[in-house]
Amino acid sequence: MNTARSHPVDHELVRAATEVARTRCRGDHHTMAAAARTRDGRIITAVNAYHFTGGPCAELVLIGAAAAQGAYQLDTIVAVGDRDRGIVPPCGRCRQVLLDYFPTIEVIVGAGDHPRAFPVADLLPESYVWADHQLDTP
């Protein structure tokens, strides 16, 4: 990571994702839960849709669920695994999509009692930037 400084962790968000993982992730189709805090303070949750062809991760399902609820600005996100696996860091694809959609989003990572929150850009150094999002930059 580019920075040694993490930001404060939204523990309510971690609890929300943990509760969804515990109560909604069953069997092989739904093994991960995600929770995100919207700019207006709401919490949106989602689960993955696992499929051997590459079904969407919980973070990607959450982006669509948030949009369906009129939330287009997300400030923080976390993913939690089923069977008490705890916080699971986003995969490379999710890191890239999160960076493209929400360049300033904080991502909660870290195991056990030591979660940390980092800007998504710190989790994807020297990253590709989606060209469509560069239109407004000088």
Image: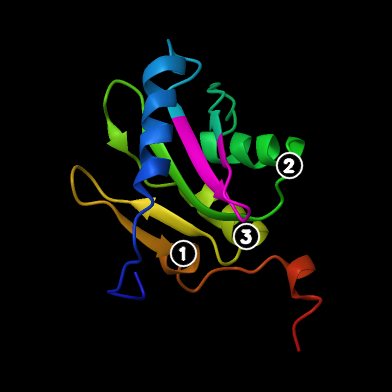
* 41 part of magenta stretch: yes
Using residue 129 as the reference point, say whether residue 50 is left or right of it: left
Q: Quick one: label 2, few (<14), some, or many (20+) residues within 10 Å?
A: few
Count every numbered label the image shows and give the total: 3
Residue sticking out furthest to the bottom: 138
* Corner quadrant of residue 6: bottom left
38 w.r.t. 16: above or below: below
Identify the element where label 1 is drawn: loop
Q: Earlier in the sequence, mark 2 or mark 3?
A: 2
The residue at which mark 3 appears reads as 102
The residue at which mark 1 appears reads as 124
For badge 2, the amino acid type reads Ala
**Residue at x 62% of width, y 60% of height:** 102
The residue at which mark 2 appears reads as 67
Q: Which residues are magenta?
A: 33-44
Residue sticking out furthest to the top: 27
Q: Is residue 124 visible?
A: yes
